[in-house]
Amino acid sequence: CEPCALGSVKNFTGSWNDTCILCPKGSSNRRGAQVSACFFMYTCQHFREAGWQTTGQYHLSLRASPTLYYAFDELVPWEADGITPQGFDARLAYCDMSTDGGGWMLILCYQRSIFDTDGRNARELPVDPERLCYSHLYLLRFSQAVQRRASEVRLFCTSSEHNRTVHFKTQHQGPLGMALRGLTQWNEPSWWIS
């Protein structure tokens, strides 16, 4: 039996060797797992762990997990016909699959002058950092899954004012809270030097 490509599973109709169907948006099969199972992909890290290695746009599941744990092994149920995986809501996100082990979701991207605030968008996730982007979305507004599973934040900043690059990650609850809930009023200098 030939395996299906990532994002596809064996269909129970037709020739078992060459009949693969796509998993619904927000789900995928996994390397080394059952050939007939789609799993919910709640985060970029889930896609990375499933074997996806290309940086780009992915659909993340918005389904509420019954356990609220949003585990990597939650199976997508099949439709009543037993042939088709059930569909569900998913949302497009940009996933960096190469930097620092991969599995990072882009939530803030502003490529503009510091004085240019026209068109700033705090309700939309940036999905292409290669193009000019003017948006951000805190994890609380994206999905409960990414909010519950986020444990660190990575920042990458450049400026035309100087040639330095700021690039680091942290598990500090201050910056992480800003990414999760957008709370910036208690921003402390100590968060950024520890």
Image (cartoon, rainbow, N blue to C red):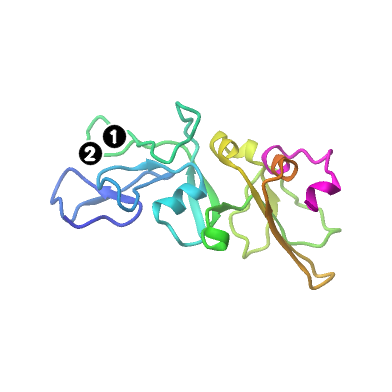
Find the residue positioned furthest to the top: 66
Q: Is label 1 in a helix, a strand or a loop?
A: loop
Nearer to the camera, 116 or 32: 32
Residue at x 52%, y 53% (from the top left corner) = 103
**Residue 57 inside the magenta-drawn segment:** no
Residue behind mark 2: 83
Q: Is residue 81 left or right of residue 127?
A: left
Q: Is residue 10 left or right of residue 134?
A: left
Residue at x 59%, y 42% (from the top left corner) = 150
**Magenta range:** 178-194
- Kindly indicate the quadrant of the structure image that contains residue 88: top left
Up the image or down, 183 lies above or below 8; here it is above
Q: Residues within 10 Å of mark 1 (few under 14, many from 20)?
A: some
Q: Amino acid at mark 2?
A: Ile
In space, the residues marked 2 and 1 are separated at their CA atoms by 7 Å
Nearer to the camera, 52 or 111: 52
Q: Amino acid at mark 1?
A: Trp
- Kindly indicate the quadrant of the structure image that contains residue 95: bottom right
Nearer to the camera, 106 or 101: 101
Q: Quadrant of the N terminus?
A: bottom left
Residue 36 in percent (x, y) is at: 25, 44
Residue 151 in percent (x, y) is at: 61, 43
Residue 141 in percent (x, y) is at: 63, 37
N-term mark: 2 or 1:
1
Q: Is residue 86 left or right of residue 137?
A: left
Mark seen at residue 78: 1
